[in-house]
Amino acid sequence: MSVLVLVEDPADELAQQALTFARSVDGDVAAISISGDYAPAAWGQTLADQVAARAPQAVIAAGSERGNEVLAHAAAILDLPLSANTIAFAAGSPPTVTRVRWGGSLLEQALLHGSTLLMTVAPHAVAADGVAVELEVVSPSQHALAVAPTKRVGAASGGVSLEDADVVVSGGRGVGSADGFAIIEELAELLGGAVGCSRAVTSAGWRPHTDQVGQTGTKVAPDIYIACGISGATQHMAGCKGAKKLLAINEDGEASIFAHADYGVIGNLHEVVPAIAAEIRKARAA
Amino acid sequence: MALAAALGASGTLFARRVTRLRALVQSAKPTERSGDVPVRVRNEVTIVLGQRKLLQRFVPGLMHAFIFWGFLVLAPTILIAMIAIVDRHQTLPWLGHQGWYALLVDIFCVLVLVGVVSALYMRKVVRPKRFEGSHLGEADLILALIATVVISLLLWHASRIALGYNEWPASWSPVSHLLSHLFGHGSGTRVLERVFVWIHVATILSFLAYLPYSKHLHIGAAAINVWFGRTAARGRLEPLRFEPEEGESEEDLRFGAGTAADLTWKQVLDTFSCTECGRCQDVCPANQTGKLLSPKLVIMGLRDQLFSGDREAALVPTAVPAESIWDCVTCGACIEACPVSIEHVDHIVDLRRHLVMVESSFPSEAEPMLRDIERSSNPWGHPQGQRADWAAELDVRVLEPGDAPPEYLYWVGCASSFDERARRTAEATAKLLQAAGVEFAILGPRESCTGDPARRMGNEYVFQALAEQNVATLNEAGVTKIIANCPHCFNTLANEYPDFGGSYEVVHHTELLAKLVSEGRLQPARDEKLMVTYHDSCYLARHNDVLEAPRELVGAVGTALPMTRSGKQTFCCGAGGAHMWMEERANPINVERVREAAETGADTLAVACPFCTVMLDDGVQSTGDQLRVVDVATLLVEALEHPAAPSAD
Amino acid sequence: MHICVCVKRVPLTGGKITLTDDQRALSTKHLGFTVSPHEECGVEEAVQIVEREGGSVTVLTLGPAEAEEQLRDMMAIGADRAIHLVSGAEEWDPQATAAAVVAAIGAEEQQPDLILFGNESADAGNYQVAIRVAHALGMPSVTGVKKITFESGRAVCEQEVAGGRDIYELALPAVVSVKEGINLPRYPSVPGRLRAKRKPLEASNPRRPAAQLEMVKLVLPPDSGKQMQVLGTGAEAAPAVVAVLSELGVL
């Protein structure tokens, strides 16, 4: 076995993508899952012990919050470099990785000088090839610094969660005020979607940070992302580039967001958004 | 004897209060208000003696003028009366014998009474909104005292004529002469004559004592306040220092007005001069659209705080609510309307300075703007690298470091660089300058925001950093002449940058374009069927007296249909005072202005400011009026390019 | 409580990224700079904790000489002192960065009870410096924290996960990486800025070890090849929008 892949849930899309990536590094892939509750340092130690025992060429995980965290622990314990959010691998001595910077707006090519190659795979950078995998369950090792979570508290609100929504209607500076979001909320509700916002909006105090879409906010992957009055700064695009389709509504025909959009409407969102809502109601009544 | 006692009592009360008032002024913070003596003298003559500001509202102005001029004319009669109390047969040498003077006295007594009656009519019957919040009871008392003074004077004169005591020819004072028929020649009249003179003097002495405790204090303070009003660069705010001087510690630095102890002596004098007339309140666009702000109540609140003696309490909210402070658009209509040269915007900005710079307390929606202006050098947080993108296709010279200086530096401003509507003005201006063969360049990415929004918001610290940066860029580039199409940039560059070592000849683009048209270097074709109403920008018209040039341009391209509130009486578009980045409560100011513009029947609303462009266009979109909002530069370019008909939009 | 917060100076990129000619760095001409967003929240968190519990806040950065601007900005919002590890023009990879931070903290007279990091830096986004520092210093760590409280000498941290939050309790001293949204950083006051100019700042010039994750060059991602379809201007575009929504099956 040449490549070890850490998998939590084999059905998970990101896990599938990580396995596909792993296969591009080397065909000989072993997927392992660690039993018991999550404890990042302990899981990191587990991977380190696996490396000591099996001497793989590489250890790979999905670039999810957990994947990055566990591999970082493993990297720290092994004192090896880690390429987080990798999208491509080219063999060599040393091999070259291409990894994501600026939430996806920039790529880095780097030489990975490690006796074992530690990498996490950027979400949605690789298409899963659907090949089935056998999962090996491993018991966790101990680590002196390991801390496990003591409890979990559920998400507070009802309504559609931003991460899972199929439709996200998002407002930026152009909305103008907290009250201005009423039309955004209306459209989101009509489409059964969630409301998002840009960082300027959170900074202005119009919406809570939980609504913020962006590099330092929530990353969304809806079927359609409707960006209203959002200019298209890279840090925002980092949050919504997972969307299958992007509709941008902006008064400024030169706004950067139009470069990333599938559909565009040039106009004042205060007129366009209510018009869309009215049109939806009309279409449904018919 | 009795007179001496009365004088003594009144004088003491008066003096005690005046001493306190003087102490409040002297213990206040310093400010520079010297120089320009000829202008100050002219202001005293026109504003004080000539009642020019008061006469902006003709009827109430005349009412006041009668009373004011009356008091000037009648002043010597106070002495005459006091002399007569001591010896009923003595009077002022020479003047007391002059018939013409007695005539003047009679005429002005009547005029004062006319003034008092009309004042009472206005306050009791008409009851205009501007008196809301004023101390009406105090005003009534003052009117009653004035009436008593004047009536007692007439009756006294009348009784003297009846007794034959008059030192002047009775026929010269027709009113007193007429009234004298009420009195006989006997002892009753002799008593009455003493009664009237005592009533007259006693009323005056009581008035004197009461004066500095009431808003009538303005009669002393106003003349002084007018003298110390701004004479030049009215749009300039006074800078603050952030480095302690010799012998000063950092704690001594003044970051705006947090407590009564922070007010400058001019600000203190402003509060003493306020007569609570409410004209400022009436013309305030925020007040007129249902917001809390009343410039009058701000000044009264500060005055009351000063008199309370509490120099520790926070002025906001103790004297003035925070909401009022943030409602202000710094349009200066209040200052223009104020008959006693109070500079309300100074007060409001100083209060903002303390709130923003010391307490970090300000409307949260403005925080992105403040952060962006500091970190990205423009209030929208756009990358400066894109600042010259609007000029990409226009063959405009971008000045690089080390280049030879241009004849004119065209300062484009953040709005015209980045906002899609305001950008058209920059394009038009560039094309016009090129068509006229004017040699110019732009700074492009090296042009940072002038800092106006930060300064009007109260963040003087961030403003000064930007000012210093821009002045360094301009000076290193050897710039001497600047064209600005944004009145806010224009105001800051022309009036405020000299404080930071930047002295340039700054013209507004309409001024230069009007000159080019009058010189024949631009020859627009006029379409008389183009009905244009021109909206004066506050920062151009009121703060900087640029009125004619844009009108010449409008006249050169179409037919002008002026609005009622135009020129120095212009009504704000609502974007000033950093309001472009703040939310607005109640009714929007821009919609109110668009309504007024639509009423003229014009099809085009011409502006000369990128903020006005955006605000009024937003207003038109929300009212649905058929009005095209466009900068005069764009109209001019269209009149050059399409001589037959302007482009439809 | 003595808290050390590690921050990084990053450019404000706006809508487009451009590279230098050698393709080894962002072209930062005309760009403004700031502290990376997660980290600014970290400093605010530290300042708030110390306002409640007493103690002091040290802010630390590994960055070019210009990064002093960010250190002064952080002292303006309440950090008491700063440590500036002056890096040259070259980038430091995560291991080198962590080693420099560990050495600096090791040299401190007063050891911190809590070391805060941002979850990942806005630019490089390596997600690992905090954890490496924690292991090197023998401290427990947790990442992605949106709330920190203290109970009986332990740091109670809430980590955001899908569907809610996991609660971790860490014995002090500990390393925590926080995410934006944990708080809203305050706007600095002018007295704060003036005081910050005089607060102590210790600078040193650590030697950069050879990179293990060695950046060769930066590349702009390939154009998506998207051709935007303009559905219309203004409210008249509404029917076209609804047609698209219907096609996508979200209606």
Image (spheres, rainbow, N blue to C red):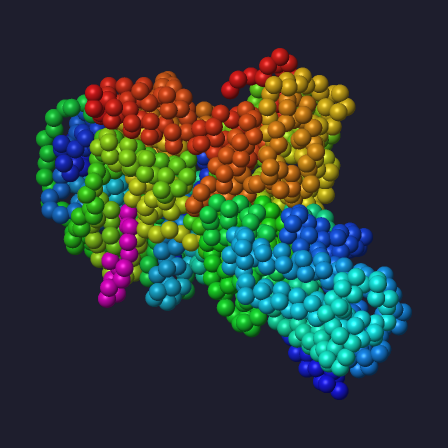
Left or right, B631 with respect to B314, comes to right
Instruction: Return the residue nearer the eye: A147 or C49.
Output: C49
Residue B246 included in the magenta stretch of the image: no
Tell me if A284 is positioned left or right of C89 in this view. left
Identified at 29% across, 44% down, the residue is: A210
Residue A215 appears in the rendering? no
Please state the horizontal and vertical placement of residue B67, each as a whole percent of the image.
70, 60
Compare residues B116 and B502 and report the one nearer the observer.
B116
Name the spot of residue B460 as percent of width and height, x first.
57, 52
Q: Residue furthest bottom?
A: B1
Is residue C148 in the magenta section?
yes
Q: Residue furthest top?
A: B644
Quadrant location of the N terminus of chain B? bottom right
Count the marks: how many? 0
Q: Is residue A101 above or below residue B524?
A: below
Where residue A36 appears, x then y in whole percent? 11, 46
Q: On the picture, is B393 further left or further right than B371? A: right
Residue shown at 63%/27% (left/top)?
B560
Q: Which segment is the magenta one?
A: C143-156
Does residue C233 appear in the picture of this structure?
A: yes
Residue B192 higher or lower than B351, as above or below: below
Rendered residue at 24%/19% (across/down): C247
Magenta segment's dominant SS is strand
Q: Is residue B426 above or below residue B573?
A: above
Q: With A107 as the anchor, is B383 left or right in this view?
A: right
Front position in the image: B336 or C128: B336
Q: Quadrant of residue B75?
A: bottom right
